[in-house]
Amino acid sequence: NIGHDVLLDEFQGLIEREQKSRSHDPITNDLKMQVVQACRTRHQWDTKALDSLRVIQTQALQDRNVPDKQQWETAANSWSKLFTFQGSTIEEKNRQQCVKELQKLLLNRQQLDKTTKHNYTFRSILDYDELTTVKKNLQAQKVDVSNDFISDLWQRVYKIHFLKRNLSTCLDCRRFFYYYQKGLSDQGLDCHEVVFFWRLKRMIEITSNAIRQQISNIETRRLEREVKEILDDFNTDETLKANLLKGKRVDLAEELKRVRQVQEKLEEFIVALNTEK
């Protein structure tokens, strides 16, 4: 879906940038945007490419052998940037406030873990009492959101919490590549999180590269063929053409066309008269 959306967003962006140029002719604006919308409905990603992508992703995730120290340290460090990015993308007021309340909830769970023998922090489910508490706290701040909104955001907050917890171990393991390479695991520190992040990072890189190549080598040409087919379909629909191509210049062109048709009929009539004489 991401590759599909990026391709069509870029196509629409190309049309919109061309419309802003000084040499642009606005008479085709409606037609071009109608073509873009038709492409969004018609264009489907090549199913063979999807199957191939799944195989590539599976192979990347199954590979547990970090090849060198540089990639080991990169895997240990790079994921810390993810959480900074995640935090900066939550801009809407409701989402920001909801995240704060859910983070407070996680903190309360951690405090409960210290005083009891239960592992509340590790529960991925938001129970009814917790959901009600979060919603009431938000309402007190004049933030009105649905239960589904809170539950959906909770899944994201919990996953980030889980990754952060594993990231702390990764940072401790940055200098332990030698022990990993030699197969030593008795150093008092379990560094399987680094391998996990390396596999995940490698899978994302391979996926991005495969999608980029698919867009450049195949999907762009398929989209070009679809645009031609759509224009051919539009050309057979006189009503649609009349709605998409409007303006004084179009009206003038239609009038000139009718004048030429009348002239042709007159010329045929004159030829017929001369023939009779």
Image: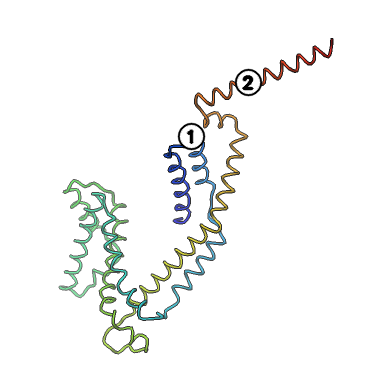
Residue 51 vs residue 266: left or right?
Answer: left
The image position of residue 259, as x and y in percent, is 63, 19
Circle nearer the N terminus (1, 2)? 1
Name the residue: 31% across, 69% down. 79
Q: Secondary structure at mark 1?
A: loop
Residue holding disc 1:
25
- Tell me, for residue 129, which label it has, or none: none
The image position of residue 176, as x and y in percent, is 30, 83
Estimate the spatial distance between the alpha carbons at disc 1 and disc 2, rounded to whole Å: 24 Å
The image position of residue 161, as x and y in percent, is 27, 66
Amino acid bearing label 2:
Arg
Residue holding disc 2:
258
Name the residue: 28% across, 59% down. 154
Residue at far top of view: 277
Q: Residues within 10 Å of mark 2 (few under 14, many from 20)?
A: few
Amino acid bearing label 1:
Asp
Specify the color scheme.
rainbow
Q: Residue 205's image quarter?
A: bottom left
Reply above or below: 252 against 174.
above
Q: Residue 196's image quarter?
A: bottom left
The image position of residue 274, as x and y in percent, is 81, 12
